[in-house]
Image (cartoon, helix red, strand yellow):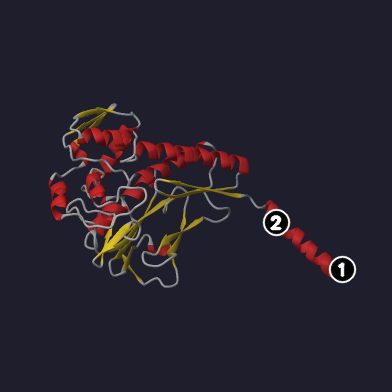
Amino acid sequence: MRLIRCLLGVWLLALLAACGEPPLYKQQAYVFGTLVEISIYGEDEAKARAVAGQVFKDFDRLHGMLHAWKPGALARVNDLIAQGATEISTSPGLIPILQDAARYSEKSEALFNPAIGNLVRLWGFHGDSFEGNRVPAKAEIDRLVQSAPKMSDLGLAGYSVRSRNPVVRIDLGGYAKGYALDLAAAYLKSQGVNNALINIGGNVMALGKHGERPWRVGIQHPRKSGAIALIDLNDGEAIGTSGDYQRYFEAEGKRYCHLIDPRSGWPVQGVQAVTVLARGPQAGVLSDVASKPLFIVGAEGWRQMAEKMGIAEAMFIDGAGKISVTQALAPRLQWQPGAAAAAVVP
């Protein structure tokens, strides 16, 4: 009987401790062609469910507006450009997004180039569910590259898009998830939610903390299941990874990933993954956009491109699995078993 009373006392203490612990609420949905999860710490369930539900509604609306292929504001602009229209009226909410994407494209020396949507489609990487399995004809690739579609072909002002190049097809797949992170963070803060983690298919932003500790996230190993490293994110920080393992197919022993070099029209070879960490008023967008030009420029130029994009904390993994990490990021990474030794670069 005494043992039973002791066990009951321990159980009651554990239950009371659990009851006193602030709640962690999680909600998931499939948006932007990927799994999205929102974690909210320290709010009652009713409020957490309501604000998370609104975030997912905003994400659905944004996805519909920015989808390059399904009916919506951006798809309509793309279709009219292809038909030869030189001036197109559109939703006023779309113009600032396109202006911002164009600014990042210029900053990256057009290596981040949302105007190459026709190349993305040619390679079969345009659907939410990827089913590509063929290498296009070189002549088709060359034709699109020679047409040189770029964001600077567009005039963006007021409610209208002007196009000088009918081969431009805008695909914001490398921008929209980051924009959504910033949008969600601003909304959650406006509702008094100061501790949350927003994860859009590996593009992650942290608000506040997870109780007494920072939010901890994993960086996917490009060739194994699980994380290659863990990192604690501070309030307002966002992290994004581009990898050749995310959307790809293999043909004749070669891997073709969804990250296309706009200069050649071919998927990038010789890089497995790039991870960047960003902070500031557009941390989400920057974490999404900046990994692409670093990936595309490759082993010889990724460090210089990181500086150009305003990124101090980055990790680059080449085609052989060699890891390079910037001096600013290295001390924050908690390497997991099986990770190769990393070279630290200034």
Density class for disc 2 (Cα within 10 Å; few <14, some 14-19, many ≥20) is few
Q: Which residue has dot 2 on it?
A: 17
- Cβ atoms under marks 1 and 2 closer than 8 Å: no
* In the displayed structure image, the side of residue 145 where residue 61 appears, left or right: right
Task: Indicate whether 6 appears above or below 66.
Answer: below
Task: For label 1, count other residues whose C-alpha is less than 10 Å away and answer few (under 14), some (14-19) or many (20+).
Answer: few
User: Residue 94's x, y, as percent?
Assistant: 33, 33
- Relative depth, front residue between 138 and 303: 138
108 displayed left or right of 185:
left
Q: Residue at x 26, y 41 (%)?
A: 170
Asked which quadrant contains residue 153, the reply is top left
Question: Quadrant location of the C terminus?
Answer: bottom left
Indicate the amino acid at tag 1: Met
Identify which residue is drawn at 56% across, 38% down.
50
Is residue 286 among what the camera can see? yes
Tell me the SS state at disc 2: helix
Residue nearer the viewer, 146 or 71:
71
Task: Between residue 209 and residue 184, name the one nearer to us.
Answer: 184
Q: CA distance from mark 1 to mark 2?
A: 24 Å
Q: Label 2 is placed on what type of residue?
A: Ala
Rendered residue at 28%/63% (across/down): 250
| Residue 198 visible in the displayed image | no
* Residue 169, image quadrant: top left
Q: Which residue is mark 1?
A: 1
Residue 193 in the image: state x and y as whole percent.
54, 42
Count of numbered labels shown in the rendering = 2
Residue 159, position in %: x, y? 29, 26
